[in-house]
Amino acid sequence: MIPRNTTQSRKIEFRFNAPDAKSVGLAGTFNGWDAARAPLQKQTGGRWSTTLTLEPGRYEYRFVADGRWLTDPNAKETAPTPYGERNSVLVV
């Protein structure tokens, strides 16, 4: 019997509304908290988006808009940070 690979990576779209931002990135446990590794692209109406391929797991993340770290207002779950703020949580 050959074991099957039960991990199925999934494409996840992240969206953030920031009409006045000049740049938006995505930082989290999936990229070493480096927002430069996951820049969002500006869409119409001031929305920003990017798509990442993630393995199953629990991830914490935040958006970084013009240098400001922001919690995802659409996240179903958050977790406290050591800095007194909240990270957004995604379970894939």
Image: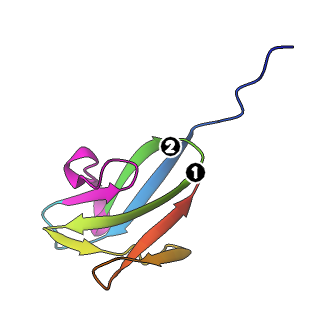
Q: Bounds of the magenta span?
A: 24-47
Q: Please, which residue is most extreme toward the front here?
A: 82
Left or right of 39 on screen, residue 56:
right
For the point 44% across and 63% down, the residue is: 60
Mark number, residue 57: 1
Mark 1–mark 2 contact, CB under 8 Å? yes
* Rendered-image quadrant of the N terminus: top right
Task: Single out the mark in the foreground, 1 or 2.
Answer: 1
**Rendering coords of residue 2 (x, y %):** 80, 14
Q: Quadrant of residue 35?
A: bottom left
Q: Residues within 10 Å of mark 2 (few under 14, many from 20)?
A: some
Give x and y (percent) for residue 3: 78, 21
Mark number displayed over residue 80: none
Per the image, the residue denoted by label 2 is 54
Give the image location of residue 18, x and y in percent: 26, 72
Crowding at mark 1 (Cα within 10 Å: few <14, some 14-19, many 20+): few
Kindly identify the residue that appears in the image at 58 percent across and 37 percent down: 9
Q: Residue furthest right?
A: 1
Residue 13 in view, yes or no: yes
Q: Is residue 86 above or below residue 27?
A: below
Q: Nearer the viewer, residue 22 or 5?
A: 5
As helix, strand or loop, the secondary structure at mark 2 comes to: strand
Residue placed farthest to the bottom in the image? 84
Residue 15 or 68: which is nearer the viewer?
68
**Coordinates of residue 52 in the picture (x, y in percent):** 43, 44
Residue type indicated by callout 1: Gly
Spatial separation of the CA atoms under disc 1 and disc 2: 8 Å
Quadrant of residue 6 in the image? top right
